[in-house]
Image (cartoon, rainbow, N blue to C red):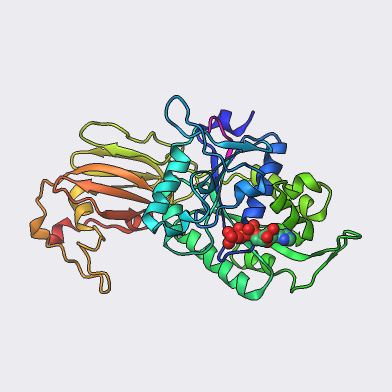
Amino acid sequence: MTQAETSASPRMIAISSGKGGVGKSTVTANIAVAMADAGLRVGVVDADIYGPSIPRMLGIASEKPAMSPDQKVVPAEAHGVKVMSMAMLSDDDSPAILRGPMVTKYLQMFVRQVDWGALDVLLLDLPPGTGDIQLTLAQAFPLSGAVVVSTPQDVSLKIARRGLRMMEQVMVPILGVIENMSGFTCPECGTVTHIFHRGGGEAIAQELDVDFLGEVPLDPTVVDCGDEGRPLIRAAPESPAALAYRSIAATLAGTGGDVAGIASPFAWTLAEGTGKPAPASITKGGPSDRLAALDHSDGALFLRWADGTDRRLTDRDLRLACQCAQCREEMSGKRLLNPEDVPLDIRLTRIWSVGNYALGMAFSDGHDTGIYTFKALQAMVPTELEDV
Ligand SMILES: Nc1ncnc2c1ncn2[C@@H]1O[C@H](COP(=O)(O)OP(=O)(O)OP(=O)(O)O)[C@@H](O)[C@H]1O
C-alpha cells in the first residue's frame, strides 16, 4: 500500500540550504527521480523562485502550463516526476523582482492551485538562505520535515547549522543532512578522492542530533546532465553519485517524518462550527509539543497535546496573552494592552493553524494579529484574576 492510500495528503519535504550553489536543486531533481523509480508518486515544487532550475535539469520545455477543467494548473511531467516551477510561468528574469510576500503567495498557489492528483511525496526545492522567505515558507506549509544540503567547506557547514536551527525554531522536523560535492569522482576510473575536509556534514548531524543522509561526490558528469535535462541518476545510474542519490531517496521515502497531531492546515470558524480539526490519536509518551485535539465551550479553549496532557484557557486569558506588536512592546516585552479594555465576555471567533508550531486566533473585538506558539500555550497560566 502506498503512502497516499493511507493518508490524505502527501508527505511534504523541504530541501533547503543555508547558501546558494551547494547543489540543492540537483539533489532535489535526482532524489525525486529516484523516488519515482522506486514506485512513489512524486511532485516537485521548484520554490527557488529567484533561480528556478528544476525544469531545465529534468528537460522540461518552457511552455505555459495547461489548465484543468476545475481551473487548476496542470503540472509538467518528466522522468515520472510532476513539476511546478516559476520557470513555467514567466521569463527567466522576471521572478527576481518579486518581494517576499508575493513569493509566499505564489508558492502557496504552487501547492494548492496545482492539479497534482494523488501524490505520495511532494518535494519543495526552497530558495537558498535562512531569511524571511524561508521562514515564511516553513510556516505556510504543513511540512513533514526538512533536509539540509551542504558542501564540505567549513563556511558552508556553519551556514547549514544556521538553517537547521531555523527549522528547529518553527518546529519542522529535520530529516537529515546531505553533504554534496564531497570528494571528487575520477571520470576515468570512478574512484572518489576527498579533496576537501571530509565528514563535516556528518559532524553537524551528530552535533545537532539529526540523521546524516549521505554524501554525494563531486562528479563532472552532474554538470553536463543538468545542462542536458537528463538527471545523473538516469544518465549514469551506476556512478557513485547516482548510488548516493538513490540511497538518500530510499532513506527519505522510508523515514516517518509524518507530523503527529491534528492535520493542518485548518481554519475553524467557531460561530459557524466549520473547519474544526478532527482529533488525532494520542500515544503515551508521544510528543508533548504537538496538538492532538482542540475544543471550545463556555468561553474557554480546550487543548490536548499528543502526549495526552491537556489545558483549558479562557478566551479572555488568550486575548490578554497576545504577543503581537500592537499588544506587546517588542523590545521590552511590556504589555501595551490595558486589561480594562478587554471585555469580560470577549470570545474567540476563529482559530487557524500556523505551520506545525502555532495557532492564529481572532476575537470578538476584531483583533486577529496574534500568533500563539504551542510552546507559549503550554507555558500559559491563567492571568485573569490578577489582571482585572
Ligand atoms: N555532486 C555534484 N558534482 C558536480 N557538480 C555538481 C554537483 N551537484 C551540483 N553540481 C553543480 O553545481 C551547480 C549548482 O547546483 P544547483 O543549481 O543544484 O545548486 P543550488 O544549491 O540549487 O543553487 P541555487 O543557489 O541556484 O539554488 C550546478 O552547475 C550543478 O550542476
Q: Residue lying farthest top?
A: 69
> As rendered, which of 234 and 142 lies closer to the eye?
234
Residue occupying the point 69% across, 34% down: 39
> As rendered, which of 49 and 196 lies closer to the eye?
49
> As rendered, which of 385 and 95 lies closer to the eye?
95
SS assignment for the magenta stretch, majority: loop
Residue occupying the point 44% across, 51% down: 288
* Ligand 1 placement by image quarter: bottom right
Is residue 357 in sight in this rendering?
no
- Relative placement, left or right, of 22 versus 267 is right
Residue occupying the point 42% across, 40% down: 262
Whether the magenta-drawn stretch holds residue 31 is answered as no
Q: In the displayed structure, would residue 290 be above or below residue 128?
A: above
Residue 253, image x and y in percent?
65, 43
- Relative placement, left or right, of 15 versus 138 is right
Residue 276, image x and y in percent?
32, 35
The stretch of residues the image draws in magenta is 116-121
The quarter of the image holding the C terminus is: bottom left
> As rendered, which of 30 and 204 lies closer to the eye?
30
Residue 338, image x and y in percent?
11, 62
Residue 348, image x and y in percent?
21, 44
Is residue 208 in sight in this rendering?
yes
For residue 377, which quarter of the picture? Answer: bottom left
The quarter of the image holding the N terminus is: top right
Residue occupying the point 42% across, 45% down: 108
